[in-house]
Amino acid sequence: MTGLHLSGITVRFGGLVAVSNVSLDAPRGMVTGLIGPNGAGKTTTFNACCGSVPVESGQVALDGRDLSHLSPAARARAGLGRTFQRMQLCDRLNVAENVALGPEARASGHRPWGQLFGTPTQQRGVTAAAHEAMERCGIAGMAAINAGELSTGQRRFVELARALASDFRFLLLDEPSSGLDVAETERFGETVVTAVGDGVGVLLVEHDMALVRRICEQVWVLDFGELIASGPTATVLSSPEVRAAYLGTDVGASV
């Protein structure tokens, strides 16, 4: 199948099992949610997908290709991109330069000599990809502003634009709405939905349930490192088991 497939992923830190036998599918062309309370193992699952933490057992595959034995850089070259809870921007570079770092890094990874120089054609391609991504994220007017001068919400859009400019086939978005106001969150969701309309797959870790409801077609729920539910978003979020695990037993009607 196309998209991200996890099979039996287990991650252990000493005596602590952070993720236990997690299997899930996140197809391309749609947004899939990965939700759960703090400490449920969501970010650890992302780290396992990217290869930044060792996996005790299990397999990570993208579009049918086993990535389990590849380095984080090789997984990125294979088409798996990521954003982080803590944004990683170069504050002394302007927005356009930050966004361009994405396609530049991916291109140089495919051609190591490209870390030293690029052809004019390659440079034009990077510039065009960065500009298109900034337009899609509504930040083209900020291109010349240093990242260090931006608000948290604006920085989130720069990080998303950098990922989109890199032409990944699948994106892992880790709490991307953190720091966004209501209007920014709505625009962020629209941008992500547009990306999946172009055939990109997205696995979204998010605590904003309104955003999850709006853009996720299906969700998987983690609790204490184990999957406890999966299925269509509305069905899963209305499940008493999920409501109890994610929001506590007295959940009211807030989901």
Image (cartoon, rainbow, N blue to C red):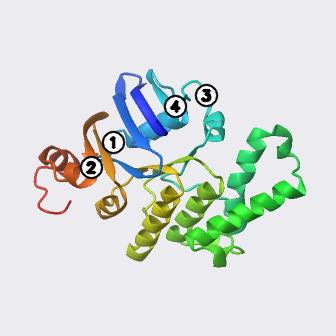
Give amino acid for label 2.
Answer: Pro
Q: CA distance from mark 3 to mark 2?
A: 32 Å
The tally of labels here is 4
Closest to the camera, between mark 1 and mark 4, is 4
Q: Which residue is denoted by mark 2 in the rendering?
A: 232
* Image disc number at residue 117: none
- On the question of residue 175 being in view, the answer is yes
Q: Amino acid at mark 4?
A: Gly
Foreground mark, 3 or 1? 3
Instruction: Give the labeled residue for mark 3.
Output: 70
Question: Which one is nearer the viewer's eye here, 138 or 225?
Answer: 138
The kind of residue tagged 1 is: Gly
Residues at badges 2 and 4 in contact (C-beta under 8 Å)?
no
Identified by mark 3, the residue type is Leu
Residue at image position (62%, 72%) is 135
| Above/below status of 38 relative to 157 | above
Q: Are marks 1 and 4 in contact (CB under 8 Å)?
A: no
Q: Position of residue 197 (x, y in %)?
A: 49, 59
- In the picture, the quarter occupied by the C terminus is bottom left
Query: In this rendering, is residue 100 above or below 245?
Result: below
Answer yes or no: is residue 92 visible.
no
In the structure shown, which secondary structural element does the residue marked by tag 1 occupy?
A: loop
Camera-side mark, 4 or 3: 4
Location of mark 1 (residue): 39
Label 2 residue SS = strand
The tag earlier along the polypeptide, 3 or 1, is 1
Rounded to the nearest angstrom, the CA distance separating label 2 from label 4 is 23 Å
Tell me which corner region of the image, top left, top right, bottom left or bottom right, holds residue 45. Answer: top left
